Amino acid sequence: MIARAPLRLRPLFGALAWLSAVLALPASAPAETVTLFAAASTTDAVEEVAEAFAASTGVSVRPVVAASSTLARQIAQGAPADIYLSANVRWMDYLEEEALIDRRSRLTLLSNRLVLAAPSDSDLRVTLSPDADLAAKLGDGRLAIGDPAHVPAGIYAQRALEALGLWQDISSKLAQAANVRAALALVERGEALAGIVYETDAAISKRVKVIDVFPAAVTPEISYPLAIVAGRDSPAVRRVYDYLQSGAAAAIFRRHGFTVAPRGS
């Protein structure tokens, strides 16, 4: 005869059996988070794009922003980035040469312009031309730029100043920063009399104003290449990559002052 549990214990045994069955079920896989390594100058825009994408799809995007050079080196050292958005071609070329991006996914996403900015209460007046006496107007003040040894905005700034014939006189007055947002912060705090930043950076700050825009003829093309990191392609990553090229994302980038490259660039 099979022994039966006392009636008073049967509800307890039933609850235990239910709990055992639940615990035996496979755990739900955590939702995938796509990590986007993006140039510091895109900070506000990519954060808004990430929020919009997550709201519409439920897929989380984690932007990691820093100087393009820093991000490229981190990817080369094995950092778990899924997508890379650089502020210049040089660092994307570096990763492509090392076979660290999916070269078939590489495209130009955005472009930008370079400006001379100063604190909003500054009375500095400069027209950027070969005749500009920028060094004299700075006096004992400093000019903030991204480090031209590796920061894209600093590299662009040096080339533009060289093309205008102003680099030699100004090079001793530089306050070099780790990225373009750090250069902007020096101007905002008044620690630099002026700074060379992207037009989009100056546009987000109420504490600086644009003194002049660098002429297109002396400024290298400022393009933002996008690519999927090698070995990181997945349906979720591909959805984010495609969304970055979508009309919805383009509207956000334009609102932040970027020029959106035509599809297929």
Image (cartoon, rainbow, N blue to C red):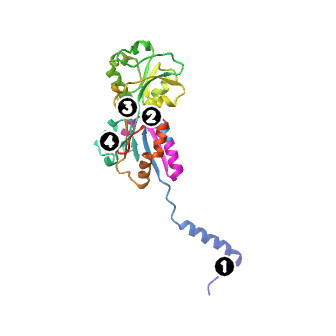
Q: Is residue 47 visible?
A: yes
- Going by the numbered disc 1, the residue's amino acid type is Ala
- Going by the numbered disc 4, the residue's amino acid type is Leu
- The alpha-carbon separation of the residues under discs 4 and 3 comes to 15 Å
Label drawn at residue 68: none
Q: Quadrant of residue 116?
A: top left
- Closer to the chain start, of discs 2 and 3, is 2
How busy is the neighbourhood of tag 3: few (under 14 within 10 Å), some, or many (20 plus)?
many
Residue at the far bottom in the pictured view: 1
Does 82 appear above or below 151? below
- Closer to the chain start, of discs 2 and 4, is 2
- Closer to the chain start, of discs 1 and 2, is 1
Instruction: Give, as a single range, the part of the protein colored magenta.
Output: 48-72
Label drawn at residue 41: 2
Please report the residue visible at 60 percent of the width from the left and 72 percent of the height from the top. Answer: 17
Does 204 appear above or below 144? below
How busy is the neighbourhood of tag 2: few (under 14 within 10 Å), some, or many (20 plus)?
many
Label drawn at residue 152: 3
Give the structural element (helix, strand or loop) at label 1.
loop
Please report the residue visible at 36 percent of the width from the left and 14 percent of the height from the top. Answer: 131
Cβ atoms at labels 1 and 2 below 8 Å apart: no
